[in-house]
Each structure stands twice: as C-alpha cells, then as structure tokens.
Image (cartoon, grey):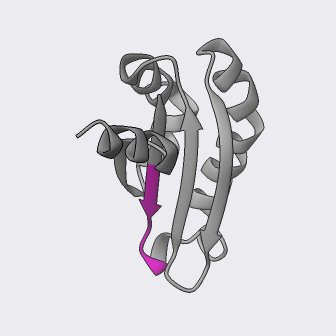
Amino acid sequence: MLVLQVSKHDYSSCPMFNERSLKASKKYMAGEEAALARHKIKLIGSWTDFTSHEIFNIFESPSMEEFMKMCMEPEFMEWLSFNDVQTKAVIGRKDVMELLSSK
C-alpha cells in the first residue's frame, strides 16, 4: 500500500534554526534506512518545501499497521515532537483509472 505523509513544523522549530530539532532530524535520518528495513517499508520519494516548512514523503508499506509501528520507533517519535503530521493511505492514478473503468 502507498502512504503519503505530510509533515509541517513551525518556523521556530525549523531544524535550520533550532538546535534541538536539528539534532532530532539528524538522528532520525541516520536511523531511517534501518527502521524502514526492519518494517519492510520502502521510501518512494521525499520532497521539502523550505518556504512553507513542509515535507512530503511517499512510502510503500505492507500495511498501515506496519507503517504505524515504524512511526513509533524512538527516533521517529522524537522527530514527531516538533512536526504536525498527516498520514494518508493513497492509491496511484492507474488504480483510480481501473476503478473508474469498472463502473
């Protein structure tokens, strides 16, 4: 399943200017690959809009339950402490077209 995650932080907690957030971000990024592997999750892509302090990630996960288990890893929880995060199960355009053509 595909999972879209949109994270947003306030300018005052931006890792570019906040030492605590910078430390947590570096810790998260250093452990991200291992956490993804432990949960059999693949990061499809990641994009950052620096001007709006937003990060857009797309993951491929075996299930939402497994994705949420990964989000409960200590490094991820620390990173979440300064980000507001929306997590959504999404489908690709090809799947949407198949659903629509079956109607």
- Residue 10 in the magenta stretch? The answer is yes
Residue lying at 49% horizontally and 45% vertically, measured from the top left: 92
Residue 72 % position (x, y):
43, 26
* Residue 66, placed above or below residue 3: above
Q: Is residue 101 left or right of residue 32?
A: left
Residue 61 % position (x, y):
53, 25
Quadrant in the picture for the C terminus: top left
Q: Residue furthest left?
A: 103
Task: Please count the marks in the image.
Answer: 0
Judging depth in this view, the residue of 64 and 71 nearest the camera is 64
Image quarter of residue 27:
top right
Residue lying at 56% horizontally and 46% vertically, measured from the top left: 58
Q: Is residue 21 left or right of residue 65?
A: right
- Residue 87 in the magenta stretch? The answer is no
Residue lying at 58% horizontally and 15% vertically, measured from the top left: 39
* Residue 81, placed above or below residue 21: above
Judging depth in this view, the residue of 65 and 2 nearest the camera is 2
Image quarter of residue 49:
bottom right
Image quarter of residue 87:
top left
Residue 77 % position (x, y):
45, 36
Residue lying at 45% horizontally and 49% vertically, measured from the top left: 5
Judging depth in this view, the residue of 82 and 94 nearest the camera is 94
- Residue bounds of the magenta highlight: 5-11
Residue 38 % position (x, y):
65, 13
Q: Residue furthest bottom?
A: 51
